[in-house]
Image: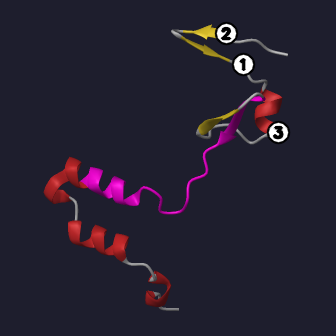
Amino acid sequence: MTTLIQIGNSKGVRIPKALIEQTNLADVELEFEVLPEKGLLLKPVVKQPRQDWENQICEAQAQYGEQADEGLLLDVLNHNDDANDWQW
């Protein structure tokens, strides 16, 4: 059993190392899900492949300006079936 502990202006829970290893939660981004009348579920964030690429490209363009190869980046982003382009 554990209790909430003070961490700065927030509260936290210490999770035993064995539980972290057993659940593969080490060094992963976590999300919380509130389960009404049951508690709080802690689970790893599952990202879809290529999720947020468009936002990341826009951020890179804003940060690097002309140094970002806009044409190439947008072409890769908009290209849906790249498997046909590979030469084997």
Q: How far apart, in angstroms, are the residues tagged by discs 3 and 1?
A: 15 Å
Tag 3 and tag 1, C-beta contact below 8 Å:
no
Q: Which residue is mark 3?
A: 22
Q: How far apart, in angstroms, are the residues tagged by discs 2 and 3?
A: 23 Å
* Kind of residue at disc 3: Gln
Q: Earlier in the sequence, mark 2 or mark 1?
A: 2
Find residue 66 and report its horizontal and vertical position in percent.
14, 58
Q: Which residue is mark 2?
A: 5
Tag 2 and tag 1, C-beta contact below 8 Å:
yes
Q: Earlier in the sequence, mark 3 or mark 1?
A: 1
Q: Is residue 61 left or right of residue 8?
A: left
- Picture quadrant where residue 68 is located: bottom left
Q: Residue at x 78, y 37 (%)?
A: 21
Q: How far apart, in angstroms, are the residues tagged by discs 2 and 1?
A: 8 Å
Q: Is residue 32 left or right of residue 67?
A: right
- Picture quadrant where residue 71 is located: bottom left
Residue 41 within the segment the image draws in magenta: yes
Find residue 54 and report its horizontal and vertical position in percent.
35, 60
Residue 58 within the segment the image draws in magenta: yes
Q: Which residue is mark 1?
A: 14
Find residue 26 and report its horizontal and vertical position in percent.
68, 37
Does residue 20 sit above or below 55 in this rendering?
above
Does residue 15 sit above or below 70 in this rendering?
above
Q: Quadrant of the N terminus?
A: top right
Q: Residue at x 52, y 9 (%)?
A: 8
Find residue 86 and report its horizontal and vertical position in percent.
47, 87
Residue range in magenta is 38-60
How many labels, in total?
Answer: 3
